[in-house]
Image (tube, grey):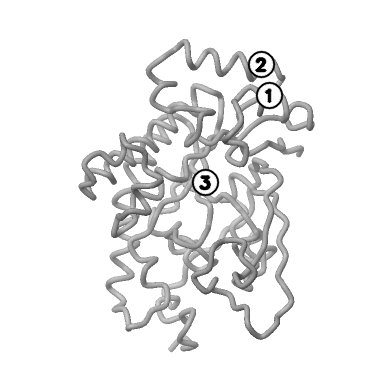
Amino acid sequence: MKHPVTLFTAQWADLPFEEVCKLAAGWGFDGLEIACKSQHLDVDRALEDEEYLRGRKEILDRYGLRVWTLSNHAQGQLVCDDPLDFRHQNIAGSRTWGDGDPEGVRARAAEQVKKTAILARKLGAGVVTGFTGSKIWRYVAMYPPVPEEVIDDGYADFARRWNPIMDVFDSEGVRFALEVHPSEIAYDYWTTARTLEAIDRRSAFGINWDPSHMMWQDIDPANFIVDFADRIYHVDCKDTRIRAKDGRVGRLGSHLPWGSPGAAGTSSRPVRATSRSRTRSARWPRSATTAPSPSSGRMPG
């Protein structure tokens, strides 16, 4: 089965939408994954102004492109993150941030993700990619020790906030693909399995597969694909390079800016592709609550 190969527009957010379409068509892409947090597509305006939406469709038609996917990572991040602070204000946009009251921000962000599903259906896109945020990512080091019930509550909080969002995706016939990524409720193999279980494995919720986020964690991308194949709704085609060890550069980035010489990892993202594969899937084992944490080295007991 041939899968469409699309250009993710976020890396060209400084260019006008029509210019990006012209470039993508010239490079031979099948279509676009349009980033909603840019001048390329304003979700609220597209749903409120038929002329604006029609204009976007006309530009796409002019260059023979389809919209296969919409991306709304920033709004999804706000739904579960706790605390919300200056970092989130920088990505939220004034409409979502409002007065900064945390629950108000989360509620408005959730509405934006729902609206993205509605807009995806109007554009003929079957997938929305994005982030979920996480109430428990801040505990990733698991020290000072974190009680098991705190972690349990993090997954329950995710399910409580995202099930109503997924209800809208179901009604629109659109699927959500979480980019498994540091700072999200699912950031590796076992957190992905537990996330799917937390949301009752509902079909609208799946994975945006980016192998680069697994490589630096020493997770085998092939095993991940085999075990979660029925949930991979979208794929990032990204090259990844793990630098030769020099005894100084570690895995965690050293609080250095992205791309600086001492920071871990280098990656590039040329394209993204939509996938609809279906095979067997993995499930989170209950024993994973006592699996080794990133820093502890404890073995399951």
Label 3 vs label 2: CA separation? 26 Å
Residue carrying label 2: 61
Q: Quadrant of the C terminus?
A: bottom left
Label 2 vs label 1: CA separation? 6 Å
Q: Nearer the viewer, mark 3 or mark 2?
A: 2
Q: Quadrant of the N terminus?
A: top right
Mark 3 belongs to which amino acid? Ala
Image quadrant in which you'd find residue 147 = bottom left
Can you give x and y, in whole percent of width and height, for residue 161 in the image?
30, 49
Q: Residue at x 39, y 54 (%)?
A: 133
The answer to whether marks 2 and 1 mark residues whose Cβ atoms lie closer than 8 Å is: yes
Q: Is residue 121 above or below residue 99?
A: above
Q: Secondary structure at mark 1?
A: loop
Label 1, residues with CA under 10 Å away: few <14, some 14-19, many ≥20: many
Can you give x and y, in whole percent of width and height, for residue 72 in the image?
47, 40
The answer to whether marks 1 and 3 mark residues whose Cβ atoms lie closer than 8 Å is: no
Residue carrying label 1: 65
Q: Compare residues 25 and 199 and report the one nearer the observer.
A: 25
Q: Residue at x 39, y 66 (%)?
A: 137
Query: Looking at the rendered structure, which numbered label has been put on residue 177?
Result: 3
Label 3, residues with CA under 10 Å away: few <14, some 14-19, many ≥20: many
- First along the sequence among labels 1 and 3: 1
Label 2, residues with CA under 10 Å away: few <14, some 14-19, many ≥20: few
